[in-house]
Image (tube, rainbow, N blue to C red):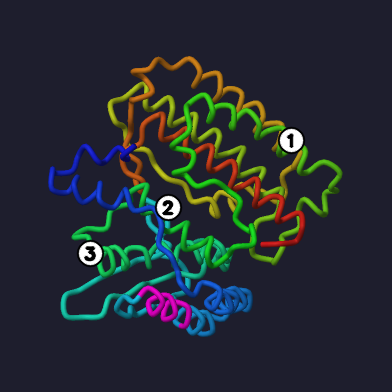
Amino acid sequence: MPFAYYTKLSRAAQAVYRKSDVITEIRLPIAAELRPRVEAVELALLSEDRAATQRATERLILGLTEALRVPPVRVEVLAARPHAGWGELHGLYTATPGRRPKIQLWMRTARQKRVVAFRTYLRTLLHEVGHHVDYTLLRLPESYHTEGFYKRESSLFHQLVPDGRDPVLSVEDYARQSITERLKRLERTADALADAVRGHDEAALARRPDGNSWAAKEILCHLRDTEELFMNRFEQLLAMEEPLLLGLDADRWADERQYLSNDAIQAGAAFRKRRQESLDFLRKLSPDQWKRAGIHVTRGRMTFDDLLTLMAWHDDNHLDQLKRALNGRI
């Protein structure tokens, strides 16, 4: 199913979109040979050394472009992400006629300057490589964010990281599920969080796995507060015609709201209450109301259906992050 912005495209652009959408995989003939370069990127990030991360990223992208037999691309690893009211920029691909294309990546968050998690960084890298592949290998006149595009990104990731380290379903995986299936996924989250933190003391819940990534307690508080944000968006969609849906600065919230000083059990209980309110609200929507939409500052036009998909993915992503934090892994 095409994403919502498909209907806004011209017929010619829709044809390009459909062509992109049906291509769901990019095969790496030497994926095993590239995995040491992937590990080198992870080690460089852990060292928090920008120059080392630049070198490791250059070697990985060189290996990818050679394996895929596409033209080389420059890479530039920068420090803290650019930040504005719409959110943070994670990566950027630019292609200027007569010049070698360039990928820019940022290795630290905008507000607290934390080094980003390895999987987030690698996903961003492969996302930008995906744009390069669209233009140079698939010969598409435009590189759209289609379901096929995200599947191609995932196919590259799982070939390079095949050990099950990324079990979380993608946004696109959830978008294919029925509303009922996604609502059932949302129902399970509060219990899953309670099971994950049960038996862990306050010190464990407040311990950051690497001094930069969030602790389990901070993740619980983030889920609690974003649930309130989702409810605010729901109310906007019903009250107004295509309202502007603002993003959030998660690190700023964690700092300003002093998540590490919060009580983890109370945060989990507050999330459970707010999640039940969200479920009650969503179950009352009519078929026509599910199609109502707003304009998200970074994601574009989003319907109630799109927000439900985002919530299901958001739950999976942070539940996995919480479990890794409790195990001392980023």
Q: Is residue 109 above or below residue 290?
A: below
Mark 3 element type: loop
Does the magenta-highlighted stretch encompass residue 61? yes
Q: Are marks 3 and 2 in contact (CB under 8 Å)?
A: no
**Amino acid of disc 2:** Lys
Mark 1 element type: helix
Does the magenta-highlighted stretch encompass residue 66? yes
Instruction: State which mark lies toward you, 3 or 1.
Output: 3
Residue on which the image places disc 2 = 151
Horizontal and vertical percent position of residue 165: 63, 59
Q: Is residue 187 above or below residue 302?
A: above
Q: Is residue 65 above or below residue 308?
A: below
Label for residue 266? 1
| Residue drawn where x is 43% and y is 62% of the image | 90
| Residue drawn where x is 41% and y is 30% of the image | 305
Residue range corresponding to the magenta coloring: 59-68
* Relative horizontal placement of residue 38, taking residue 85 as reference (left or right): right
Horizontal and vertical percent position of residue 135: 25, 66
